[in-house]
Every structure is written in structure tokens, then in C-alpha cells.
Image: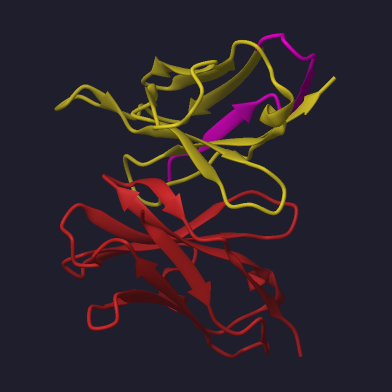
Chain colours: A yellow, B red
């Protein structure tokens, strides 16, 4: 199985500041045939299902604010929130979907400082 | 707009089989690009991918559960189902169904809590 490791496990950021969450895969999830990274990011708020933020590592899902950005390639990926808003407090998960089982990272809890 | 809704028993006894259904609206379960998935989340913990079924009927399962899990599709009612056998307390979780587009999960149900207890 591909192991996904997120860092940090939790972070507290002030409103308006930048938040950065990292995700590392145990093997490359860049598929050479189409040059796509098989990585998604999700946001989960308490009592709600996860919500897709990004797929192919950096393609923003419709309706996601542009203060969110996804980047990275091969084994190292980053989710960045450029200017934190109160509604961004949540747990964030990365997931690889290159090879089944499509494993998730352990999650990063983002709190407002 | 695609919507998914899980249904099934909230309480199941150990060693029994769990059967959950996900009813899909706003999309055909036979549409070629859609992949129908199950994911679970124990209370206060992370997400675990259980498995998926393609519109054509082929399946992939998490090896950690593979021998106990079956996912199937009912095209007549536009729903898909999850069966998990030989339940233990470790199977207690919120179970989500979701739609995969090229495997990433773009639409999720609200989830249903399943408790395994005698």
C-alpha cells in the first residue's frame, strides 16, 4: 500500500495569515503516461462529510475559494491557504488515487489562533 | 446535482453482517465515468477507503477488509450496496458512500453511524 503522511498533525494560525499543510507519499504518485499526480485534498468540518478541494494535486474543485492552492509533484505535496478565514477551521486530508487501496493521510487539524 | 444518501441499521451485533445501501440521485449509476465508493471513519479518527465498484461491475477492495467486504450495484433502483461480514467492535464507524470521478471523490453522502455491539 502507498502510505500517505501529513505534517503537521495540527496547527494554529491567525486570521489573515498563511497556513501550509504538507503531504508525503511513500512512493511516487506521478503517472508518467499522462504526467498527472494522482492526489486529492479534502476538507472536513465537524459533523460533515469530507469536501473535495483539489484533484490532480492542483486542480481546484468548482466553488473552492482561490485563497486555497495545491502544489507539488511525485512524492511531496502542499496545500496552502493564503489568508486564513474563520470558516477554514477544519481537518484536511490528502488522498492518493493512483493505486488501490486509495489511501488517505492521517489528517491535519487546522485551528484559528 | 448529484446526491447520495446512505441507509441501513445503526446497530449490529458482533459476528453479524452489515448491509448498507447508497441511493444515488441526479446521476445514473451506470454512467461510464462514475465510480461508486465506500469509505469509513471511526469516531475521532481518520478516513479509511473500503472499496469501489465501476459502472461495469468490476470492483476493488482494501486488502485489510477484502475477505469480508462485498460491493454491488442495483441498476434497477439506482443504488449500490456494501456488505461487511464477521463484524467486530473495530468496525464501528461512520460509513460514507461517495462518487468517484476518475477515482477522486467529488460527491459524498452525509454518512451513517454504525455501531457494533451486543
Residue lying at the far right of the rendered structure: A113
Tell me where residue B110 appears, x and y as whole percent: 56, 61
Residue B71 in view here: no
Residue A78 in view here: yes
The boundaries of the magenta stretch are A1-18
Q: How many marks?
A: 0
> Vertical placement of A93 versus A49: above or below?
above
Tell me where residue B6 appears, x and y as whole percent: 50, 71
Depth check, front residue: A84 or A73: A84
Residue B8, quarter of picture: bottom right
Depth check, front residue: A65 or A33: A65
Is-magenta flag for residue A6? Answer: yes
> Vertical placement of B86 versus B49: above or below?
below
Residue B62, quarter of picture: bottom left
Tell me where residue B61 appears, x and y as whole percent: 37, 63
- For image coordinates 51% across by 25% down, the residue present is A24
Amino acid at each position: 500500500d502507498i502510505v500517505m503522511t501529513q505534517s503537521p498533525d495540527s496547527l494554529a494560525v491567525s486570521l489573515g495569515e498563511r497556513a501550509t499543510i504538507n503531504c508525503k507519499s511513500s512512493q511516487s504518485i506521478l503517472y508518467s503516461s499522462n504526467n498527472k499526480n494522482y492526489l486529492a485534498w479534502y476538507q472536513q468540518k465537524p459533523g460533515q462529510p469530507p469536501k473535495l478541494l483539489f484533484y490532480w494535486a492542483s486542480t481546484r474543485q468548482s466553488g473552492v475559494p482561490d485563497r486555497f492552492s495545491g502544489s507539488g509533484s511525485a512524492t511531496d505535496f502542499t496545500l496552502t491557504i493564503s489568508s486564513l478565514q474563520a470558516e477554514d477551521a477544519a481537518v484536511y486530508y490528502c488522498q492518493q488515487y493512483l493505486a488501490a487501496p486509495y489511501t488517505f493521510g492521517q489528517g491535519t487539524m487546522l485551528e484559528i489562533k | 446535482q448529484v446526491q447520495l444518501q446512505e441507509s441501513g441499521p445503526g446497530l449490529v451485533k458482533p459476528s453479524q453482517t452489515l448491509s448498507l445501501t447508497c441511493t444515488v440521485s441526479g446521476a445514473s449509476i451506470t454512467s461510464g465515468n462514475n465510480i461508486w465508493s465506500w469509505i469509513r471513519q471511526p469516531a475521532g479518527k481518520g478516513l479509511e477507503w473500503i472499496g469501489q465498484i465501476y459502472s461495469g461491475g468490476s470492483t476493488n477492495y482494501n486488502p485489510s477488509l477484502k475477505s469480508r467486504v462485498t460491493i454491488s450495484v442495483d441498476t434497477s433502483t439506482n443504488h449500490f450496496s456494501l456488505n461487511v461480514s464477521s463484524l467486530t467492535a473495530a468496525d464501528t464507524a461512520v460509513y460514507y458512500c461517495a462518487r468517484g470521478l476518475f477515482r477522486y471523490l467529488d460527491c459524498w453522502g452525509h454518512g451513517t453511524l454504525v455501531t457494533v455491539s451486543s
